[in-house]
Image (spheres, rainbow, N blue to C red):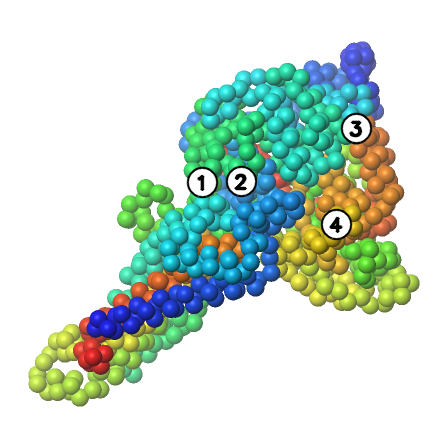
Amino acid sequence: MTRWLLRRLVLSLITLWLLATLVFIITNILPNDVARTILGPFAPQESVDALNERLGTNDPLPVQYLRAMRSLITLDFGNSFQSGKPVMPLIIAAIGRSGLLAAFALALTIPIAIFAGLYAGRHRDQKSDRAIVLFGLTFSSIPEFVIGTFLVVVVGVQLHLLPVLATPPSNAGPLDLARFLLMPALAMAIVYFGYIARMTRAGTIDVLESDYIRTATMKGITTSQTIRRHVLRNALVPTVAVIGVQIGYLFGGIIGVEKIFNYNGMGQMMLFAAQRKDIPVLTAGVIVIGIVYMLATLTADLIIAWMNPRVRLETH
Amino acid sequence: MDYSRLDRVRRSATPMELDLVENFAQGKITRRQFINRATVIGLSLPAIGAVIAACSSTPPAASAPAGSPAAGGSIKVATQRPVSIDPVGMQDLSGYGMVSQSFEYLCTLNKEGSDIDKGLATEWTPNADGSVWTFKLREGATWMKDGSPFTADDVVATMGRLVAAGNAGLKGVIDDKSTKALDASNVEFTLLSPNGNFPYLVSVFNPQSVITPKAYETGTTLDADPNGTGAWKMDSYNPSTGAVFSRNATWWGGTTPLDSLEFLFFDAVGPQVTAYQGGQVDCIVQFDVLSGEGLLTDANTNVIATRASTHRQIWMRVDKGQFVKKEVRQAFALSLDRPKMIDQLFKGRADLGNDHVIAPIYPYFDDSVPQRTRDIEKAKSLLAAAGAPTISATLHAGQLLEIPDLAQLVQSQVAEAGFNLTLAVEALDPFYANAWCPSDPTTKKATNPPCVLAAELGIVDYGHRATPDVYLNAALKTDGDWNSSQYRSPEFDSAFGDFQKAIGVDAQKAACKTIETILNEDVAVALPYWYNYLAGSSKKFQGIYSSALGQMFLSAASQVA
């Protein structure tokens, strides 16, 4: 297990280095003048040149690349080109907000989706199974921002049931926080319900058809005991893997939901940084999201290894 | 008409003031225009009142009383995310809105939102030809950071910073030696050439001309150094989420009814409108008709609609490419269906443009230049005469408000005349950098005028200005800083010079007629419309007014009891 962990760690570091290099290449290929972007189209050229000099964007590319790699190692990405403020506190605040929303969305969807998937798997081809599959397929085909827009208009604007902006006041308590974040979390939860429920259903069907379940049934173990002791931990293996991958997406990929609800998570921050060629923020954001992805998939692998001893044995 | 009263004002008036009084007395300008212009040129309030009283026997109707104001509370304002809140370097309307809460102008906005009024200056007087302006500064104004008094030295330093930064409104008007402190309370501006509109150039309509302290460093942002003489002090600023201002207890204007302001930042207008409709914000700094159509008819919303000089210019390169010939440019302009554009994009809330930059809201606008209307047959014959029955070109535009929709309308409308346009709509940053006004950094300035690498054809946005000086100077004058069409016309340059030197409405109008005629004929830019600036606030609040440049004035705002 230790060797497996070390191998994963080394692979993760190599992946992060590749990510940082890719971001560097892309941001330097994109046509644009960083200082002109910051100062605006009407600023005198002299001011633009002076700012480019100060920011180091006129330095040779190898020098800029080494600077970027040094930032990666020390996790000190300097100051934002746009705001002049230190990058890491901005990133940490944004990742915190994204994490909060992601956690809320997952807390809403995971229990319900797993229960639905198990139920559907146990009642295969019955009406309830078809309804769950249909519901899941339908809503996982609709983008989150479409569902989000519907929720905003109906629930927020017309019915005034929930706030349309996901911007709780700084002194908001847990209940207030939940009220402000419920709609964007729901928009995401409804979409991910389909993925998770169908993975769980497939895993459940697969496990229920296996020999050891037949043996357990013939031994007289009750259905609920069978489900709890044998079906769950085996059926959920693919589900856990899917959730691990989705976590990374939830942190950086839900720009549509963030825009609709004016929620300043990592998606909005990264989009803004890319538009403004704010390279330090962009690089830091990509690295941090990469780290989140790696931690999420590593955690998922560890959970799978704990759930499934055969995985553990195979690693030895 | 009370001639004796009028004569008393006439006897003490300067030539410029006399000209204005005569124009009003003869009915050549409306009372509103008279008041606006009189304020600009420094006619005293008693004299203004005397002239109005002399020329009218009917007292003005009292405005309907507002609801009872309630003290205290806070207001939430939705605004576009600012790009910069550096008072000298800011370029976007949201930045102007932020900074103007704390910093003030020599000439501020009047409560109607249409013209200038006393701000940090309480009086301004020109010499006989408008080449020297003396401003009397407000006493009692202090800097909120340390309580030190606002003085003429602050104005001198501010103007020096603006000149050094190449401020578009003041370029060519003053230089670094123009501003002099006569004493602590009086400043004298010696202009590079006479300019009857100078007060506008140090007013709210030149957003960067906010007065900053003497020791202020260029590049300092409002959040890095919260200061100013204004009604609100910045408490916090998060570029991701918003800003909070609290009352400046030492403001010269007294105690604001509200305790605080909270600005929430958005990246698009749509979420601002839904936030407003959902009750999470109380007002919107700016919205467009297409995104906020529901607000226009909402019974619970005060819509602040200001006729403005905000417009779009469709520039065409006159020095090279397919639009060199005037006939081609005229054909392009004749292909535009302007009323349809206004109807589709603004639901009628715009004025027709006539391919020149003198907006109908200006008192010196001359309406004798025939309005260009759509004439496809004439457009086709012009193209044929130019030897180019069809033109294929790329129309560049930035993703801002209705501009992408305008580009599509233009594409479909001009196609009937023979213009086959490909659209290149992109984010604002690359558009400004690559299409609108790029210069060639490899050549010297003498052979490298600004915008020398501008695209052949494109649409650019211009915000509201109380005078057309910036449009005339920057966009159209030879070697103007924003002259994307590379227009060079000695006749136009001369007419612009005449306008700047003109004293009095009649002289300005005569100069504008020449300008309008030249530009309408040459069509360096096609200008289809001037649209209204729209802002909105809940009827739970009153006392809010706004410029057409994103500056929302909240010092008199209060909740309705």
Contact flag, marks 4 and 1 (Cβ < 8 Å): no
Q: Are marks 1 and 2 on the same chain?
A: yes
Q: Which residue is mark 1?
A: B237
Relative horizontal placement of residue B525, taking residue A56 as reference (left or right): right
Residue A279: where, in percent of width, then height?
49, 56
Q: Earlier in the sequence, mark 1 or mark 2?
A: 2
Residue B462: where, in percent of width, then height?
68, 46
Q: Which residue is mark 3?
A: B194
Residue B445: where, in percent of width, then height?
75, 47
Can you see residue B228?
yes
Q: Earlier in the sequence, mark 3 or mark 1?
A: 3
Q: Residue at x 67, y 49 (%)?
A: B461
Contact flag, marks 4 and 3 (Cβ < 8 Å): no
Viewer-side label of 4, 1: 4
Q: Earlier in the sequence, mark 2 or mark 4?
A: 2
Viewer-side label of 4, 3: 4
Contact flag, marks 2 and 4 (Cβ < 8 Å): no
Q: CA distance from mark 4 to mark 1?
A: 41 Å
Give the chain letter at badge 3: B
Q: CA distance from mark 4 to mark 3?
A: 31 Å
10 Å neighbourhood of mark 4: few (<14), some, or many (≥20)?
few
Q: CA distance from mark 3 to mark 1?
A: 41 Å
10 Å neighbourhood of mark 2: few (<14), some, or many (≥20)?
many
Q: Are marks 4 and 1 on the same chain?
A: yes
Q: Earlier in the sequence, mark 2 or mark 3?
A: 2
Figure quadrant of the C terminus of chain B: top left
Give the chain letter at badge 1: B
Q: CA distance from mark 2 to mark 3?
A: 32 Å
Q: How many marks?
A: 4
* Amino acid type assigned to the residue bearing label 2 in the image: Ile
Q: Which residue is mark 2?
A: B85
